[in-house]
């Protein structure tokens, strides 16, 4: 995990956040919460936003959107992901965490930012879900 922390420095987190906020602007929501995400894999960044559907079971979360874009581009190892939304303590839901664990494992870094250019809180996936099945 220490190698991941060293390779994802503050500058890279800021770049991820900027891309996630830009993608968030494209979100299609029925409610009030627009969400953006940016996934890092092999030095490449993949963005996603939430897309809500009138039959809510078809909603696409920003994290899943970003990870699917990553996989579609041929990358399979998620190093870090940031989630941006104008909400405090807004971290990925359990379903999104399944995707994060699938491609990044428990050491995957998960960041959150609640305002543009604000503080980024960083966790490992295992910190967010300490009892995730092994």
Image (tube, rainbow, N blue to C red):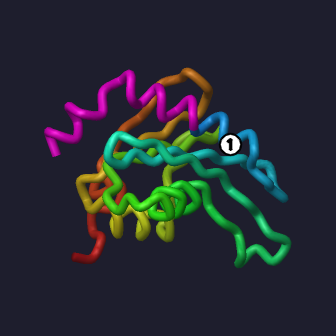
Q: Residue furthest front?
A: 74
Q: Name the residue at 14% across, 39% down.
A: 2
The residue most toward the left is 2
Is 117 drawn above or below residue 32 in the view shown? Answer: above
- Is residue 50 left or right of 5 when viewed as pictured? right
Q: Which residues are magenta?
A: 1-19
Please say whether residue 9 is one of the residues in the magenta stretch: yes
Instruction: Specify the quadrant that holds the C terminus.
Output: bottom left
Residue indicated by mark 1: 24
Mark 1 surroundings: few (<14), some (14-19) or many (≥20) residues within 10 A = many
Q: Is residue 57 above or below residue 99?
A: below
Q: Residue at x 51, y 47 (%)?
A: 46
Q: Indicate the position of residue 87 as horizontal and vertical percent values.
A: 63, 41
Residue 95 vs 6, above or below: the answer is below
Instruction: Report whether 59 appears left or right of 116.
Output: right
Q: What secondary structure predominates along the stretch shown in magenta?
A: helix
Viewer-proximal residue among 72 and 23 = 72
Which residue is pictured at 61% across the width and 28% down the height? Answer: 115
Q: Is residue 133 left or right of residue 14?
A: left
Q: Secondary structure at mark 1?
A: helix
Asked if residue 116 lies in the magenta stretch, the reply is no
Image coords of residue 102 (percent x, y): 35, 69
Give the number of callouts.
Answer: 1
Please state the horizontal and vertical placement of residue 56, each as a whole percent of the image.
76, 73
Going 62% across and 61% down the picture, which residue do you hit?
Answer: 61
User: Can you give x and y, in whole percent of width and height, for residue 112 in the image?
Assistant: 48, 40
- Of residues 129 and 38, the one nearer the viewer is 38
Q: Is residue 72 above or below residue 91?
A: below
Tell me which corner region of the image, top left, top right, bottom left or bottom right, holds residue 128: bottom left
């Amino acid at each position: 995990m220490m190698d991941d922390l060293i390779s994802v420095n503050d500058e890279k987190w800021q770049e991820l956040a900027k891309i996630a906020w830009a993608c968030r602007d494209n979100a299609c929501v029925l409610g009030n919460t627009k969400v953006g995400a940016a996934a890092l894999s092999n030095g490449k960044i993949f963005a996603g936003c939430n897309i809500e559907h009138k039959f809510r079971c078809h909603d696409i979360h920003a994290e899943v959107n970003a990870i699917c874009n990553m996989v579609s581009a041929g990358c399979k190892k998620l190093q870090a992901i940031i989630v941006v939304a104008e909400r405090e303590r807004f971290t990925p839901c359990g379903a999104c965490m399944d995707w994060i664990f699938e491609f990044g494992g428990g050491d995957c870094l998960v960041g959150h930012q609640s305002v543009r250019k604000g503080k980024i809180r960083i966790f490992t996936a295992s910190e967010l879900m300490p009892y995730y099945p092994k």
